[in-house]
Amino acid sequence: KYLWIYVGITFGLSWGMSVLYIIFYDTLAPFVGELNISNPFVMVSLNSPSIAGIIIYFIYGGFQGMESFLKCLIPNKKECIWFPILFGLSLLFYLCMHFGSKYFGILLPEVTMSSKERIIVLLKNIYEETGLLGGAFGWYGFLLPYMQKRTQSSILSGLITGFIFGLFVLPGYLFSSFETGTSYPLYVVQLIIFSIFIAFIFNKTRGNVLFFIFIFWLSASGSKLQFYNFVPSVQILEIVFFGILSILIFFWYKKVRGENLNTKELCCFPEFIER
């Protein structure tokens, strides 16, 4: 029942609002304006995955259930090593996207910001980046661990989570007011590959979505920091980057640690919040 409640709330608020806007455009447009990222109507839709995730934990265990989930956001000393690792991977990501764009002749943005301005933009992107806080507690706080319990596979669960996440963002590509210059099919593939990568990190950190927030925030900020343009050709580079990274992490743990990241120590809903 939890899955259907989650899907109902998430898609009801996002797709439901989009359909209502299309059907009753003449009535709603004067009140809500054009559908863009800063529109309150849209902000509710974008945050619907996390809203649904928090509601699920309340249904599961009341305030105690919500508290147990939020406690998972507190990393222990052993897990904190992932912060410098993910930060280093983000720097590598910036370099690969920048010089990859150069190598393949992809237009690079003109750098007009100072280092100080870049830091400000980076910090602002914590709340400006769509899907970051709005999706963390839903896609990776609930759906990923739920699917891991159902499939007993982190790779398959990441694939399913990324695909459903991709369906969720479809309305953003249907409304021209969002002015996206990216490819929707490529974006869905990005979400799938990235979700598999996140599944590995999620399970190695006892189900802490804080690390998803951290790496998603940094990796999604690269174009705003003027390191590269987020266009379809760069989307392909990002797919290749996280695809190779996921493969390397998987085989490193398998060869060096003797661990199968696909099946070992999966953080499943609701058991992972009760540890």
Image: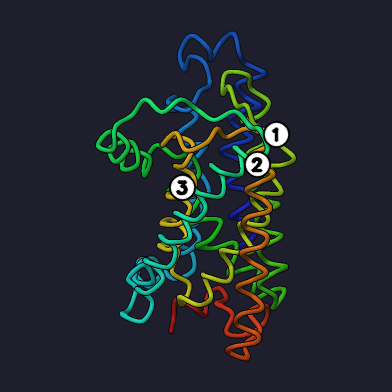
Q: How far apart are marks 2 and 1 (CA)?
A: 8 Å
Say how the picture is coloured: rainbow
Labels 2 & 1 near each other (Cβ < 8 A): yes
- The residue positioned 70% from the left and 73% from the top of the image is 150
Q: Residues within 10 Å of mark 3 (few under 14, many from 20)?
A: many
273 relative to 136, above or below: below
Residue on which disc 1 sits: 183
Labels 1 & 3 near each other (Cβ < 8 A): no
How many marks do you count on the picture? 3
Check disc 1 and report its element: helix, strand or loop: loop
Residue 237 coordinates in the image, percent (x, y): 66, 46
Q: Distance between the residues labelled 1 and 3?
A: 19 Å
Q: How crowded is mark 1: few (under 14 residues within 10 Å), some or many (20 or more)?
A: some
Residue 229 coordinates in the image, percent (x, y): 55, 32
Q: Which label number is shown at residue 132?
A: 3
Q: Distance between the residues labelled 2 and 3?
A: 18 Å
Q: Which amino acid, by three-letter code, is at mark 2?
A: Gln
Check disc 3 and report its element: helix, strand or loop: loop
- The residue positioned 48% from the left and 72% from the top of the image is 207
Residue 28 coordinates in the image, percent (x, y): 53, 15
Instruction: First in sequence, mark 2 or 1: give its number.
Output: 1
Q: Which of marks 2 and 1 is in front?
A: 2
Q: Which amino acid, by three-letter code, is at mark 1?
A: Ser
128 relative to 255, above or below: above
Farthest residue, direction left: 116
Q: Residues within 10 Å of mark 2 (few under 14, many from 20)?
A: some
Tell which of 71 and 87 is nearer to you. Answer: 87
Instruction: First in sequence, mark 2 or 3: give its number.
Output: 3
Tell which of 104 and 10 is nearer to you. Answer: 104
- The residue positioned 54% from the left and 30% from the top of the image is 108
Residue on which disc 2 sits: 235
Check disc 2 and report its element: helix, strand or loop: helix
